[in-house]
Amino acid sequence: MPAETRDRAPWLLMYHSVAECAEDPYRITVSPARLERQLRWLRDRGLRGVGVGQLLRARAAGRGGGLVGLTFDDGYADFLSAALPLLTRYECSATAFVLPGRLGGDNGWDELGPRKPLLDAAGLRSVAAAGIEIGSHGLAHTDLTTADDATLERETADSRSVLAELTGTAPAGFCYPYGRLDSRAVAAVRAAGYCYACAIDPGPLTGMYALPRAHVDARDTSVRLYLKKVLHPLRRRALPAAPAPAETAPRDGVGR
Ligand SMILES: [Zn+2]
């Protein structure tokens, strides 16, 4: 196993919505101009954004240097119109963690926030066809740590089979709604057949099924991004060795 896989967790950035937005109490919106500055900043430093599955496979093969995982949670419709064109322009890819139980709906779980439309089934297929890795964020953005057994099973296993049917590819990745997880949720995600899962700051649960991510919000500057990169290995726990997702699981690479 290459040292980079053993030694520390991969560097993963977490985005949500990409839009112009004045009112954003949950700080989930980054403007297209800011995303572009961040992608340019990464490129200028010899770094390239890719989906998490691609990043994990590259690291397992000792080729992870220079790659940064880009993740977009919730499956906002603006991914297709605002984020994807920029990712394509900068020859980056990403993982979109979507909610197959809310296709064509909105972010009704954010009580205070402005309503933002989510991708519908056709939009989701367009995103997948552009080479973006599609992962599951559960069916309906349910906190798995308070879900009963039947709900937990539906949110993990059923969301995976619905996405497999919609896109033709069973998703390799899962992402915990609200970043909330416990060992029971981790076990359910593993049992549902996923290869990895993304969290935010999973503490002692850190591992292939609880990958930490750095939150990117509208106030992030390139300098702050840089600091997050530098601090990342110091803040995060070592990642236990685990097999990378199979080569066939997600499709990666914009335009391929
Ligand atoms: Zn979410």
Image (cartoon, rainbow, N blue to C red):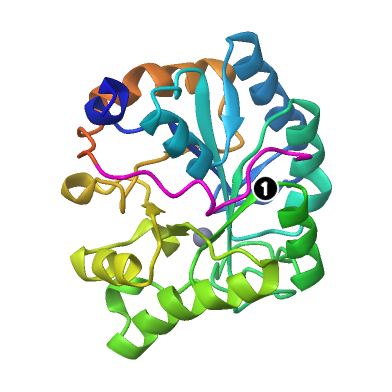
Query: Viewer-proximal residue, 202 or 238?
Result: 238
Q: Is residue 69 above or below residue 157?
A: above
| Quarter of the N terminus within the rendering | top left
Amino acid type of the residue tagged 1 in the rendering? Ile
- The magenta span reads 242-256
Task: Give x and y (percent) for residue 163.
Answer: 60, 71
Residue occupying image coordinates x 61% and y 63% = 169
In this picture, residue 236 sits left or right of residue 81: left
Q: Quadrant of residue 170?
A: bottom right
Q: Is residue 172 visible?
A: yes
Pick out the residue farthest to the left: 204
In this picture, residue 143 sits left or right of residue 82: left
Task: Give x and y (percent) for residue 164.
Answer: 59, 71
Q: Is residue 101 above or below residue 57?
A: below
Asked whether 247 falls inside the magenta stretch, the response is: yes
Q: Is residue 139 visible?
A: no
Task: Give x and y (percent) for residue 73.
Answer: 56, 54
Residue occupying image coordinates x 79% and y 51% = 80
Task: Give x and y (percent) for residue 71.
Answer: 55, 44
Residue on which the image places disc 1: 132
- Secondary structure under tag 1 reads loop
Pick out the residue farthest to the top: 45
